[in-house]
Image (cartoon, coloured by chain):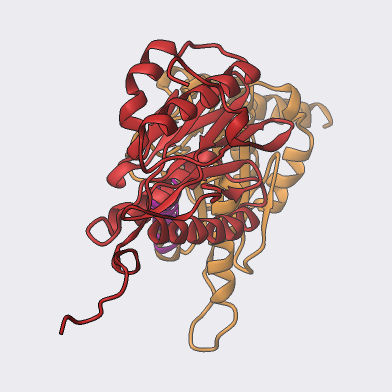
Chain colours: A red, B orange
């Protein structure tokens, strides 16, 4: 008799397959993500918000292993809370990114997660940092997750410096929509977070409101 | 009189905001505390990716000094500590830590044997309206004024600065500026001597 091992998806690692993007504009940043969480070929959560707050004006976008990414985000959230109390002011985005990088690098062999950190601070305004595999680099925009491979061409061609907030939001939505169409591990709804000097704004764009392209 | 003895608190590393540090008191204690400040600045830089804000460094050093006032197994630090820095966003900053573990920010402060006399002189200055170069001269003058010819041994004036004039780096004051400051200081003293003679 064959042993019952249960359905495959119970033994597969849960990954946030994902498409994530963060982009800097004059005066702030916009982050975007899809909402699909997969375990192998099964979608275990179709509405997960992968944009996680690290502080009032600093968010991070999660990709890779769901557990690893969430844990890193929660740890850094805690560390930033303490840090901002100690220095008695809002933390810099660079501090948040460095904290994420320090964890990602130290446990690089055990973890499998890539967080994009983006936010606004008084000193350097809007900033986007990539922390893939334990590196730390500031970029005008960053994409990540399995869906990002399908949209590198699009973002490289369409990105322009000096976009305003609305143009950035549209750019993010377009990118997510294209990636979600092609990547099997990305889908669901699009979450957008815009951060600037005045505050943080979270938005959800439901499936049928996403922009459509030639094949839809 | 203990002279100002400037050292850099952080190692010669381009990424750290060099801050200026002056100490007065038991020099061995001061050196030990310097090392503590360096380590704090270094580990902050390592953890958070940017230079430590001076206020925070001052708080950390002050907490460390304060800890030594709590236990009978150790004696308090026998030195006071001045920390200064310049940043293009936050401007110039000056903090002082004393042996009790109190730390405050200042426009002007003095430590050492003649600190009270120096404090009186500092209060006459309007620092907010002066440039770095002007203040260097005044500082030299104050050191000369408070030096007691009878009681104190000969001293050597050491001047260093950090500010927009040095692009935020801590440097010894260049020779020409220092000589100008010393000349100004000595001339001011002579003027005062002259005015004393008139009263006879």
Magenta-tinted stretch: B32-51
Is residue B100 visible in this depiction of the protein?
A: yes
Pick the residue in front: A148 or B156.
A148
Residue A202 vs residue A20: left or right? Answer: right
Q: Quadrant of residue B135?
A: top right
Picture quarter with the C terminus of chain B = top right
Pick the residue in front: B57 or B23.
B57
Q: Quadrant of residue A142?
A: top left
Residue furthest toward the bottom? B72
Residue furthest toward the left? A1
Above or below residue B14? Residue A35 is below
- Magenta region includes residue B45: yes
Residue furthest toward the right? B199
Above or below residue B9? Residue A154 is above
Residue occupying image coordinates x 74% and y 31%:
A198
Report x, y in % for residue B12: 32, 39
Report x, y in % for residue B39: 39, 57
Above or below residue B92? Residue B36 is below
Residue B196 vs residue A34: left or right? Answer: right
Residue B25 vs residue A205: left or right? Answer: left
Report x, y in % for residue B153: 49, 51
The secondary structure that dominates the magenta segment is helix
């Amino acid at each position: 008799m064959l042993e019952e091992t249960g359905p495959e998806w119970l033994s597969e690692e849960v990954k946030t397959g994902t498409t994530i993007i963060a982009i800097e504009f004059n005066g702030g940043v916009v982050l975007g993500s899809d909402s699909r969480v997969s375990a192998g070929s099964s979608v275990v959560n179709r509405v997960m918000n992968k944009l996680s707050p690290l502080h009032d004006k600093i968010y991070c976008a999660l990709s890779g292993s769901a557990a690893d990414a969430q844990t890193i985000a929660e740890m850094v959230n805690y560390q930033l809370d303490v840090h901002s109390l100690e220095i008695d002011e809002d933390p810099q985005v660079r501090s948040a990114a460095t904290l994420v990088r320090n964890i990602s690098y130290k446990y690089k062999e055990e973890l499998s997660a890539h967080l994009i950190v983006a936010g606004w601070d008084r000193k350097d305004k809007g900033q986007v940092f990539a922390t893939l595999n334990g590196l730390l680099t500031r970029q005008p925009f960053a994409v990540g997750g399995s869906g990002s491979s399908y949209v590198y061409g699009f973002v490289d061609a369409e990105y322009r410096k000096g976009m305003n907030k609305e143009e950035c939001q549209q750019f993010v939505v377009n990118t997510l929509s294209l990636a979600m169409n092609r990547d099997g591990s990305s889908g669901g709804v699009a979450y957008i977070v815009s951060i600037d000097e005045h505050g943080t704004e979270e938005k959800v764009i439901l499936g049928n409101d996403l922009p459509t392209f030639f094949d839809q | 009189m203990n002279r100002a003895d400037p050292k850099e608190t952080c190692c010669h590393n381009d990424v750290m905001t060099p801050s200026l540090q002056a100490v007065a008191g038991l020099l061995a204690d001061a050196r030990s505390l310097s090392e503590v400040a360096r380590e704090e600045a270094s580990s902050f830089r390592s953890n958070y990716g940017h230079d430590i804000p001076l206020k925070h460094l001052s708080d950390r050093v002050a907490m460390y000094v304060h800890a030594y006032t709590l236990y009978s197994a150790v004696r308090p630090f026998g030195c006071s500590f001045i920390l200064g820095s310049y940043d293009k966003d936050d401007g110039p900053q000056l903090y002082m830590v004393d042996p009790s573990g109190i730390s405050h920010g200042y426009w002007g402060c003095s430590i050492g044997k003649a600190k009270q006399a120096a404090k009186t002189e500092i209060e006459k200055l309007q620092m907010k309206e002066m440039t770095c170069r002007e203040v260097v001269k005044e500082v030299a003058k104050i050191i000369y004024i408070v030096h007691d010819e009878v009681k104190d041994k000969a001293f050597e004036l050491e001047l260093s600065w950090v500010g927009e004039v040095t692009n935020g780096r801590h440097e010894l004051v260049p020779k020409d500026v220092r000589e100008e400051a010393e000349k100004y200081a000595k001339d001011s003293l002579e003027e005062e001597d002259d005015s004393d003679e008139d009263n006879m």
